[in-house]
Amino acid sequence: MTSATQAYTYAAPSSLVDGRLGLATSGGRALSGPAVAPRFFSGVVTQAAPAAAALLGVADVALARYHQPQSRPGWVRDPVVTCNGDRLRFESFSACGGVYARLDLMSGALDGEVFDRGTTNVDVNPPLREALARIGARDPLHLGVGLDELVVTTTDGAVVEKKVPLPERWLRGFAEVQVIASGMDLRGELSGMAAVRFLRALPRKGTVWVAQAGRELRVFDRRVPGSVQLAGPNRLGTLLPLLRFAKSLRLYGPADAASSAWELELPGMRYTLTLSPERWRGFSGEGAVLDDLATDEAENDADVVGMLLNFEPEIEIGLLADRAGIPADRVRAALTQLGVAGRVGYDLSEAAHFHRELPYDKDSVLLLNPRLAKARRLADAGAVQLEGESATVHTSGGARRVSLADGSCTCEWWWDHRGSRGPCKHVLAARIVARAAVEVSR
């Protein structure tokens, strides 16, 4: 598995001194343009204890490898923070690629000044983690995202540099998870102590299914109507320290009830974990983005839509369609393309995309989709023969029969996964050629 290298450079370590939490920022992008160490926010966190605990949760996920945790050395990947003006979003991905975490600090938990909007990495070092763990309910907490002069004087002023690998599955996971989340619906909800009892009673291992039953969430050992699959319940571990602050727990799942998302509502904030369908299975192989990436117009539309993004906390598709002069379905495909570049995420609670900029570019991630690259080579080589709603794709391993209607294929990939991990290269190639034929006929 190939990997890129991410270099973090901070003017000083993040620190918590006398109730002042200064989060050092690395290179990023803001409304004002690229920045070496952007400064986004300075003010009071009105709910200090849950905010500190939830930020630790995001940092813990970035450190975690839930599948084969001892198989290789761990690498410290710093969380990403986006300032959308009225909120701060902290995001991380587990090293194994199967758990995505996000903390949304909403305006109800923040009282301060926004200097700019944008995205950057933030330093969460061991001494800071220890300090955050000691914050109590009555402790004041002043947060600075981006170091001001006062915070810098509390450190030794040394430049902090970290270089860590960013494997394919970590990068691709960010693209996949926003597409999968956009297909999820609310499947269950618990309030207060009921949420606490439910999460503490979950088994640690195995696979279970969870469904709403009246006012409760029930656990089943098999799939039942309306249930959501939960593989590796221990992957919800970072929710447990937050239960004392929880106002409610919401469960989201897609139509196929495979992946799941678990959202804790906390005072003035939300903490969300999105889990892959299996403990061993990362989001990077799901293939949810491939159909949208396979369209020629999506890339052109993404350039137009991308120029209209302004670090909005909620992207209104209808408004973007009007401003870009393209239909809403093409805006959605363009948002998928932008999501591959790390420029779009998805908020389940608000059922809306949001704008952010992750520290890697679109072209780099497109190269990490080998199925799409192979499909384009088949299409360019003239290997696809269209036959109405079907197609034959000629490969070195023989001819493959493809149904354009349901996306099935006679290849081993389709028989192994039956579409659960996105289309195979033959289906993608056939769809690329079919779209091109439609364009020529117009």
Image (cartoon, helix red, strand yellow):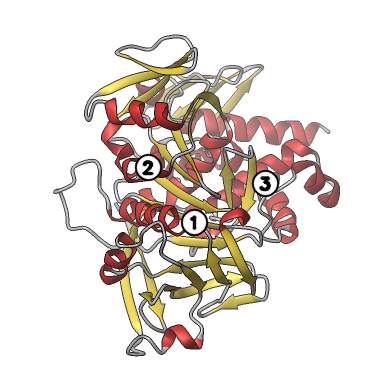
- Which residue position is annotated with label 2? 244
Image coordinates of residue 153 in percent, x first then y, are 41, 90
The quarter holding residue 389 reads top right
**Amino acid found under the numbered disc labelled 2:** Arg
Count up the numbered dots: 3
- Which residue position is annotated with label 3? 334
Between the residue at mark 1 and the residue at mark 3, the CA separation in whole angstroms equals 37 Å
**Amino acid found under the numbered disc labelled 1:** Gln
How many C-alpha atoms fall within 10 Å of the one at disc 3: few (<14), some, or many (≥20)?
Answer: many
Between the residue at mark 3 and the residue at mark 2, the CA separation in whole angstroms equals 40 Å
Mark closest to the chain's N terminus, 3 or 2: 2
Can residue 411 be seen by looking at this rendering?
no
Image coordinates of residue 187 in percent, x first then y, are 52, 22
Which label sits on residue 47?
1
How many C-alpha atoms fall within 10 Å of the one at disc 1: few (<14), some, or many (≥20)?
Answer: many
Return the residue found at the far front: 138
Q: Is residue 371 left or right of residue 203?
A: right
